[in-house]
């Protein structure tokens, strides 16, 4: 009886994992400009042209459309979570089950870009090449010359699948706290604003304009 019960628990766990597992990841770099074209046609009426949740239809909706320019809220959501919610829908937002994966990812990464600015990314780039590129590489692929001597291989920020699963808040926390036996301790010395700027630049490794 105990074996049957344990088997049931295992099957239940596997079923639960499959239900909430990510269904699809980008097969190539999402394109922000392509995402904008779709967003303007299908999302802006509720979420607003600038992503602030103040579109023409927003006043009649409850709950209100997500404000994608709210940095504090967006830092708690991963691109994969945004993909799942958009794909399946969440009242009052309809589902987008018929949209092609590539198109939906283009929209998601366009939405992600709302939580950054060109100024943040530019400042982040300067800091990245000063403090991070030696280990993480010029393109964020984790192939910098300084990484070969580290116990842990530097993270590949160009890994679209991995980055799609990460929340900016969690990435920031890793930078702020550092990771034992890794060279990321240098990021802990940065000011909070500098860390957010670096994250803004790092995100851009996974999509094109």
Image: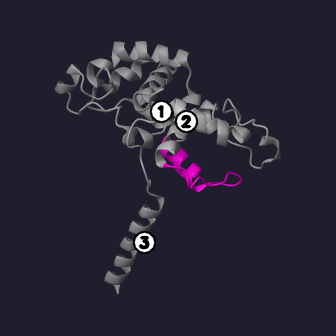
Q: Residue at the spot x=66%, y=54% of the render?
A: 94
Looking at the rendered structure, the secondary structure element under dot 1 is loop
Q: Position of residue 104 (x, y in %)?
A: 52, 44
Q: In this rendering, does residue 112 appear at all?
A: no
Q: Are marks 1 and 3 in contact (CB under 8 Å)?
A: no
Looking at the rendered structure, the secondary structure element under dot 3 is helix
Q: Quadrant of the N terminus?
A: bottom left
Mark identifier at residue 31 = 1
Q: Using the image, determine if residue 70 lies above or below residue 4.
A: above
- Return the residue nearer the eye: 23 or 33: 33
**What is the spatial separation of the Cα atoms under label 2 and label 1, in whole angstroms?**
6 Å
Q: Is residue 75 left or right of residue 25?
A: right
Q: Using the image, determine if residue 78 lies above or below residue 84.
A: above
Q: Which residue is situated farthest in the left direction here? A: 149
- Return the residue nearer the eye: 107 or 85: 107
Q: Residue at the spot x=42%, y=63% of the render?
A: 18
Q: Position of residue 41 (x, y in %)?
A: 66, 39
Q: Which residue is mark 2?
A: 35
Mark identifier at residue 12 = 3
Give the class, few, some or many, for how many residues have Cα within 10 Å of label 3's Cα (few <14, many ≥20).
few
Single out the mark in the foreground, 1 or 3: 1
Which segment is the magenta one? Answer: 78-100
Q: Are marks 2 and 1 in contact (CB under 8 Å)?
A: yes
Q: Residue at the spot x=52%, y=47% of the render?
A: 83
């Amino acid at each position: 009886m105990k074996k049957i019960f344990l088997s049931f628990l295992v099957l239940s766990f596997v079923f639960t994992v499959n239900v909430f597992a990510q269904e699809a990841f980008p097969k190539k770099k999402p394109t922000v400009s392509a995402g904008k074209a779709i967003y303007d046609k299908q999302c802006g009426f509720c979420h607003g042209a600038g992503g602030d949740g103040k579109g023409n239809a927003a006043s009649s909706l409850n709950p209100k459309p997500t404000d994608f320019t709210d940095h504090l809220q967006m830092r708690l959501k991963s691109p994969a979570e945004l993909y799942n919610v958009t794909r399946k829908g969440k009242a009052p937002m309809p589902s987008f089950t018929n949209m092609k994966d590539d198109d939906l990812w283009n929209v998601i990464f366009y939405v992600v870009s709302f939580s950054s600015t060109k100024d943040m990314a530019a400042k982040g780039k300067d800091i990245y090449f000063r403090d991070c590129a030696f280990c993480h590489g010029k393109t964020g692929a984790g192939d910098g010359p300084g990484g070969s001597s580290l116990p842990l291989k530097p993270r590949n920020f160009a890994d679209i699948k991995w980055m799609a699963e990460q929340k900016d808040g969690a990435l920031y926390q890793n930078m702020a706290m550092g990771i034992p036996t890794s060279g990321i301790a240098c990021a802990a010395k940065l000011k909070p604003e500098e860390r957010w700027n670096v994250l803004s630049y790092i995100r851009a490794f996974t999509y094109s304009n």
